[in-house]
Image (spheres, rainbow, N blue to C red):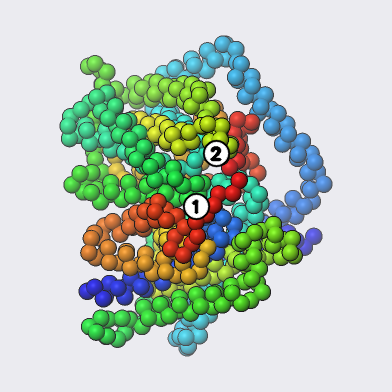
Amino acid sequence: MFLQQLINGITLGSVYALIALGYSMVYGILELINFAHGEIYMLGAYLGIIFFAFFTAIGLTAYNLPLALLLTVILSILFCSSYGFTIEKIAYKPLRNAPRLSPLISAIGVSIFLQNYVMLTQGATDKIFPHLFGAAGFEFLSVRMTFLQLSIILTSLFLMMILRFFVRKTRMGTAMRAVAQDKTMAALLGINIDTVISVTFIIGSGLAAVAGLMVAMYYGLVNYFIGYIAGIKAFTAAVLGGIGSIRGAMVGGIILGLVESLGGSYISGEFKDAYAFIILIVILLIKPGGIFGRADLEKV
Amino acid sequence: MTRPLVMGLWVSFLILPFKGVEAAVVCWVIVAGLLSAWTFLSPYQKRLGAIRQTWEVLSQKTLRSARKQTSLIRGICILCILALPHVVPDYYLDVAILVGIYVILALGLNVVVGFTGLLNLGFVAFYAIGAYAYALLNTRCGLDFWAALPFAVGLSAAAGLLLSIPALRLRGDYLAIVTLGFGEITRLILNNWDSFTMGPNGISGIAAPRIFSLSIGGLSHFYYLVLLFAFATFFVTRRVHASKIGRAWVAIREDEIASSIMGINTTRYKLYALAFGAFWAGLAGAIFAAKMRFVSPESFTFMESVLILCMVILGGLGSLWGVILGVCILVLLPEMLREIQIYRMLALGAGLVLLMIFRPQGLIGGRGASLRN
């Protein structure tokens, strides 16, 4: 029972971690809580369902399942990244020099807009992702792990490794870190800030798309309001690990997933959603920098 | 010239998977058309700027003249408001009562967001606490409205104090997130503590308030009650705003560090602001429970918090008349446009973004308000 919940928690946590990366990267660079990020994840889940249904309708799924899945993933990432890019250009870029609360309120506006946009275009009822893999899996030490769970965990790990490599080794990654440290200085050194911010949003949204798609497969059900609560949880994960840190987002996500699945089965399932908020409040009180973050000095 | 076409293409590309090819084409035509019209008209933008300036001047002028309004105009306004129940049908009266309740709520939130500059995304929690306090005291202990009111209001002010303990150590957006968490936790407790709050079924059979032996069940009586409270809220917040405490709040909003150097105990004044705002929310909650005779957690979601926030921001942060204008617009507009009500939240979201970009100080915000941090 305990080990089983552990596996479930890690699966859930790795999804949170993927979403948390988007929050973390955007916060690191713009110091903005991108409220709309949870909605991007929701869009990813919907896009996955839409494209998979499309490929099923034209017969590609029956002909070649892996190809259909691959195309679904690629298209979902493409569209979510486009949405992320567009949102930044429309709702955040004009407010870059505005007081800090303005972009936050604007982000809330985007979040409400996207939720209702999806509700109006796709309907308010649950959408179903076809059950592809069944309960196939393997047993290990009397614990059952489905292949889907394993692939969710592995995919998340793989993507985070790539992101880590990208941020550490490539030119664009270096530019991102420079912009996160000091925007003005980076601009003076010839870094195009707008491009860096756009790339950040594109990557973050792509990761959220993958997360949404995997959750759609895992639970099989998607609704237009899943983004809000998942977004808050992922944000909690990002803060828990130390906002702005990739390693922190991973660790924070896993911890949150574990707390939720263990707490949900041992303490009370009804308050499952409240754990994230309680953790968030406690961590902000005790160690606002998070596990891997550093204490933030207020600049005058 | 190709720019509008490309941008239209981009928008229709984004819509494509959600709405299909047909809608995407329609969208392309609309967006490209509007944008080319905009580019075509851009030489005349100077004139647009002039229009905007006129609006600015006009709104300031109306405001100023409204401020030193003659007693005649004031008298007519008061007479209209007082006579309302005798001239309009019950439906409008119902809407007017709703406006009154939201005015109390929005004025309360305005103290926190508008005066002090703390973004509170969980304001609805205090509203819920006020409503549930009256509902429970009435149905369980048999207290009537006036006896329960001090408890309801006191309880939500105390909750405001409780929240401020963790909240005041945080800045800006972190504070916003913690208040949001507080709101959600409150709702989850109301929803899941079945033995105490009846869970998602809510509490029904709440008594209407009475004055001596007269029951205020009728709409017109209730209208006057709400009017009285709304006026009290307006009057008290205005006086407090003009007092030493109010000036300390504004100083904190404009520059926290500078005001603490000037000797203002920022922690204490922020605490006052949160508790004072929560006080009004508790009042509004108790009135809401008495009006509806029924409360359930559904009325106290995050969207409700956002709606109240929109009312405060739309009219003008920190401006009392602006807040009342915001409430009137956001309550009356959806009532008037019932057919397109499903688009209400869509428009609200887009409106928030546009407002932040083009007029962050709100419709009649003007000089009193700023979002500076």
Q: Mark 2 vs mark 1: give the one in front.
A: 2
Q: Classify A127 as above or below B80.
A: below
Front residue of B188 and A112: B188
Front residue of B33 and B210: B210
> Disc 2 marks which amino acid?
Glu
Q: Residue A234: x percent and y percent?
A: 44, 62
Front residue of B268 and B369: B268
Residue appearing at x 26%, y 76% in the figure: A3
Q: Residue B166: x percent and y percent?
A: 39, 45
Q: Mark 2 touching mark 1, by CB under 8 A?
A: no
- Horizontal side of A184 relative to A113 (left or right) equals right
Q: Residue furthest bottom?
A: A63
- Horizontal side of A170 relative to A11 (left or right) equals right
Q: Secondary structure at mark 2?
A: helix
Respond whether the residues carrying marks 2 and 1 are from the same subunit: no
Please identify the quadrant where the C terminus of chain B is shown. top right
Residue appearing at x 50%, y 38% in the figure: B113
- Dividing the picture into quadrants, the one containing residue B275 is top left
> Disc 1 marks which amino acid?
Ile
Front residue of A39 and A202: A202
- Dividing the picture into quadrants, the one containing residue A213 is bottom left
Residue appearing at x 50%, y 49% in the figure: B173
Q: Which residue is mark 2?
A: B256
Q: Residue A91: x percent and y percent?
A: 61, 53
Q: Which mark is residue B344?
A: none
Q: Residue B175: x percent and y percent?
A: 46, 47
Read off the chain for label 1: A
Q: Which residue is mark 1?
A: A112
Q: Secondary structure at mark 1?
A: helix
User: Quick one: label 2, few (<14), some, or many (20+) residues within 10 Å?
Assistant: some
Residue appearing at x 55%, y 64% in the figure: A25
Please identify the quadrant where the N terminus of chain B is shown. bottom right
